[in-house]
Image (cartoon, helix red, strand yellow):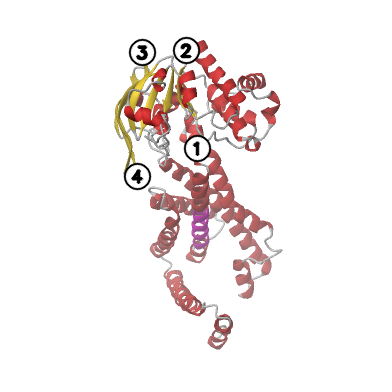
Amino acid sequence: MKSYIPAIHFRSVSYEAGGKKILKNITGSFPAGKITTLVGPSGAGKTTVLKMCNGLLSPSFGDIVVSGRPIGDYEPTDLRRRVGIALQDAPVIKGTVFDNLALPLRLRKKELSEEAAEAWLEDVGLEKEYLDTKAAELSGGQRQKVSIARTLINESEILLLDEITSALDRTSRREVEDLIVRINQKYGTTIIWITHNLEQAVSIGDYTWVLINGKLVETGESSLLEHPQNERVLEFVKGGDA
Amino acid sequence: MSPVALSLTLIFVLIPLVLSKTLHLGLEKDTLIATVRSIIQLFAVGYILKFVFESDSWTYILLMVVLMILAAVQNARKKGKSISGITWKITATIVAVEVLTQGILLGFSIVPAEAQYIIPISGMVVGNSMVLSILFLNRFTAETEAHQDRTELILSLGGTPKQAIHAQLTDAIKASMIPTIESQKTMGLVQLPGMMSGQIIAGADPVQAVQFQLLILFLLLTTAAVSSILLGFLSYPSLFNERMQLLRERGID
């Protein structure tokens, strides 16, 4: 197996909430500059892993290292700009699509130009006419696209994507996949992408984490999903709930 | 009012009792308890006030105000159980509002520094501050729960807890102040305020009664604004930890 420089490293990370063990002693790395797909059945703890990378949650036990520094050494606001996340439900704030796109900069007392907003919208496959649309009136797929564009505006070194194409049709999904691959190749951005679509996990991913019931059961190049050696991964890939 | 006339006012208690019995509303017990409690509590307060007014002692005045604040805090804190340290936060809010309003009233000699003025006005300020605190806490708790995804979104984009909760905080502050502002708009048109009515019935000059009522209305505007804003800014930090994480953050999947 090739060796990679880790962008994020988990060392014996466990997480408990409400008396329930959600992550169990996870040790593993997300390679820098690569696209890692994170797969596993519902309730495996995938979103928890993502929220830990972004500092929205902290481990109950264990350590996380981001770009060579312990995660606790970062100012939370600084960490979250470096490690951007597009959340699964694609939440929007009150106001227009433009207000939503401008949000990351406004949090830093900066403004987004209308031209830049239009360019970001086009990148995610939305027409610029949508800029003045009320965000609450968008369809699920359109909201997801706005959410992706909004995350990209912070120009983070690491991007965390939580099921961002689940509400999109086939064409839109391809557009977003192409965009993320382009960003990864152009800027060397590290991508960590949760997906339920195993075909997508293989075609997009360089590297894959398989999480089952809070445990990291397999890591390696994404092709591992095509010929799983691990019995639980095999069962998951075949469509069982492992 | 003569004792006979006072006794006759019990007719107004008998009417709902008879109606409740006839229509099987089951409110007789609560109506009786409410009547007995109000008779005992109001007479007790009346005699205590008489004693405090006659003694003309600052110790008793302060003691009365402290008792009012303690009772108000005890009542309001139940609504903010989910917010840590809510007891001291409500206490600080009500004390701040009381000190501010009395400071202005006495500092500018708007009212004389006498128990007869300080205690009833304090009662209105503390009581309204308590109601505002309850209204604010109800709304703030509901807003933060309903819009947890927005709070999380702003944090995830690198916003501070204050930025993340700002919209919910201002919505809750506005919502808790609206009843005070709205009721003042129709004051004198729809209803005559209780204090003014009381003064007029007791034989005071209606214009003078209006002047005092205006003083109270303006005072209550400040009470409403300061109570909800101060309590808001004291409350929101307890929803987050030192790593700027929502304490009720969701994970899994």
Q: Which chain is disc 2 placed on?
A: A
Q: Quadrant of the C terminus of chain A?
A: top left
Dot 4: element = loop
User: Of marks 2 and 3, which one's residue comes earlier in the chain?
Assistant: 3
Q: Which residues are magenta?
A: B123-135
- Tag 2 and tag 4 share a subunit: yes
Say if A205 sits above or below A134 in the image. above
Give the residue at x 38% y 32%. B243
Q: Which residue is mark 3?
A: A4
Q: Residues within 10 Å of mark 3 (few under 14, many from 20)?
A: few
Q: Which residue is mark 1?
A: B151
**Mark pair 2, 3: CA separation:** 14 Å
Residue B4: assigned label: none
Residue A34, image quadrant: top left
- Residue A188, numbered label: 2
Q: Amino acid at mark 1?
A: Thr
Nearer to us in this view, B86 or A19: A19
Q: Of discs 1 and 2, which sits in the foreground? A: 2
Residue toward you, B220 or B245: B245
Indicate which label's residue lies in the foreground, 3 or 1. 3
Secondary structure mainly formed by the magenta segment: helix
